[in-house]
Image (cartoon, helix red, strand yellow):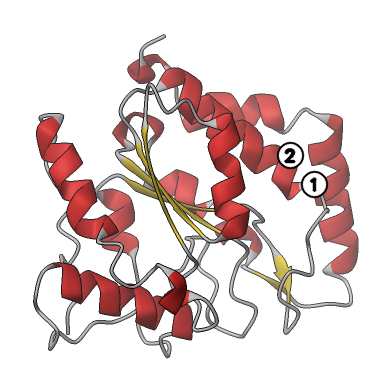
Amino acid sequence: MKTNYVQWTDLLRIEKKKKNFINLFHRLQQERRNKIIYPHNKLIFNAFFMTPFNKIKVVILGQDPYCLENQATGLAFSVFKNTKIPPSLKNIFIELKNNFNCPNKKMHGSLDSWAVQGVFLLNTILTVTKGLPGSHKNYGWELFTDRIIKYINHFCIGIIFLLWGSIARKKKNIIDSNKHIILEASHPSPLSSYRGFFGCQHFLKTNNFLKKQGKSPIDWFKNITI
């Protein structure tokens, strides 16, 4: 099936009827009564709203949202424009600037411009309790996001998947490497970035693959420098 016959609204409509999804949102609704959960309800599916299904060129998989106030935007690794840049995103920017030999560029932390250019910034878990990273593991998000990855794998061709860290790298088992391009590295966290993230050149490689496919490359610095 061609991707222009598929829209996120079609896929989400199917998913929202499934029992595990209904149970998941009931649990979130109950917990929001006495806990602060990020991101805000209206931003949980922000990655889907900002990157239409038939515009996807690249998928970057994160783990779960940032868990501090005014950070989580619904886009993996991204924060709000005027928010302090978290350590993992700092390392992403270091690698990006090294890829294109521009180490002195100053950047803010909003990755909205990547999303609108076709970079689908998907966390494997879409919510988190304030101050507790990984707190919504096994709530049911993994089942949902695995199915989203499978949808992309099935309906699209030539998508470049950037899998950073052990959680993301496990997803290669549900991606057809004959149809898509898979680039792997360690997580950009300060705890692991030195084990293969720095020097992976994924941003440069991604653009080279896009050019070979006859697609326009990602302008990684568009609307992100200050």
Can residue 202 be spotted in the picture? yes
Q: Residue furthest top?
A: 1
Q: Could you classify mark 1 by the number of other residues whose Cα lies within 10 Å: few (under 14), some (14-19), or many (20 or more)?
A: some
On screen, residue 15 above or below 31: above
> Where residue 100 appears, x then y in whole percent?
11, 68
Dot 2 and dot 1 residues touching (CB under 8 Å): yes
Name the one closer to the observer, 89 or 171: 171
- Circle on res. 143: 2
> Where residue 116 appears, x then y in whole percent?
28, 50
SS class of the residue under badge 2? helix
The quadrant holding residue 215 is top left
- Circle on res. 140: 1
- Circle on res. 205: none
Residue depicted at x 48% and y 26%: 153
Can residue 44 be spotted in the picture? no
> Where residue 9 appears, x then y in whole percent?
53, 30
Name the one closer to the observer, 117 or 89: 89
